[in-house]
Amino acid sequence: MAHGHKSDEKVVYVGDSRVKKSGRIDGTPPDYTAFPGKSEAFIPNFLLKEWMVGCVVLVGFLVWVMAEAAPLGYPADPTNASFIPMPDWYFLFLYQFLKYPYVSQDYVLLGTIGVPAIMFGALLLAPFLDTGKERRFYRRPIASSLMLLSLAAVTYLTVVSWSHYQDQLEEKGIVPEHHERAEKVREALERGEERPSFLKTDATPALIEADDPAFSIVEAQCISCHAADLGGGAGPSLIGIGNRLSSEEIAEIITHGTEGGMPAFEGMISDEEITQISEWLAKQTQS
């Protein structure tokens, strides 16, 4: 700061009031491209930012999960031949990928361990493998191309997997379990009833005369559709069928089948076995 107009008077600066001609008077710092050979430190600067973004995304997912219940299905039943297994949406791409012959069957280890290990390993090692100074994506053709290719592949496999699943449901006439539950809840609320519970609280009734030789024939021919406890799966429940049908009616259904449902067993098993099954099923009654 100058005192007076004398040329020999000492000039004192308070702080640093000198401003360079090429300086940025707006206070905006230059970006990293202004410093060739230098960039932001990955650890801890960049990593800390990524962690903060990850925390925000995680909190968002937690809020979403608490607000919208997961569409859980019924307990798994290995005897249900009509069940179509499906993973969670974020694994649909890998589920579809494993359907291709070069990563399944004899090459299943490559598809389940090898390829995912390479993908996720490359993702973890990306900061150490790609150490270029350039930060603009169009100046990094290899890294940018791999990223776009990965996103396109994941999107394509996810869409194909979901489309195939919907086609299978339509072809087999299957309604997803969570849709059935939602429909039952809606119908109950419309009737003014309480929301139904889908938890199994009652044990399945024991089979009558389970040691009968006819049961071994039923196990070999029927449980794939009607379940091991005859509680139903792809086919209807046979518990209490003796209250609804006589042994002759059951034998008629086994022999000739039903339209659009049970196949005909005529010629597949003997008439004697059909009689044994029908008489044993007729004993399966409920009080």
Image (tube, grey):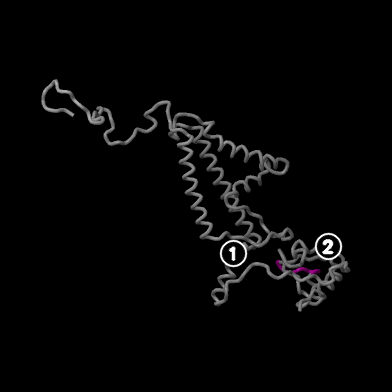
Number of numbered discs visible in the structure rendering? 2
For image coordinates 75% across by 64% down, the residue present is 227
Task: Name above or below for residue 209 compared with residue 147.
Answer: below
Quadrant of the image occupied by residue 226: bottom right
Furthest-bottom residue in this view: 287
Where residue 111 is drawn, which disc sits there? none
The segment highlighted magenta reads 254-260
Asked whether, in this view, residue 205 is left or right of residue 162, the answer is right
Q: Residue at x 28, y 36 (%)?
A: 26
The dot on residue 179 is 1
Going by the numbered disc 1, the residue's amino acid type is His
Nearer-the-camera pick, 214 or 57: 57
- Density class for disc 2 (Cα within 10 Å; few <14, some 14-19, many ≥20) is few
Is residue 114 part of the magenta span, yes or no? no
- Residue type beneath disc 2: Met
User: Residue 265, percent across and down?
Assistant: 81, 65
| Residue 255 belongs to magenta span | yes
- Residue identifier under label 2: 268
Q: Is residue 272 shown above or below 104?
A: below
Whether residue 273 sits left or right of residue 20 in the image: it is right
Q: Quadrant of the C terminus?
A: bottom right
Q: For numbered disc 1, what is the local secondary structure? A: helix
Which-is-in-front pick, marks 1 and 2? Answer: 1
- Residue with the most extreme top position: 8
Image quadrant where one finds the N terminus: top left
Q: Residue 60, percent across and down?
A: 49, 53
Left or right: residue 73 compared with residue 246: left
Rendered residue at 49%/49% (across/down): 57
Q: Residue 102's image quarter? A: top right
The Cα atoms of the two marked residues, 1 and 2, are separated by 36 Å
**Element marked by disc 2:** loop
Give the left or right position of residue 38, taking residue 102 as reference: left
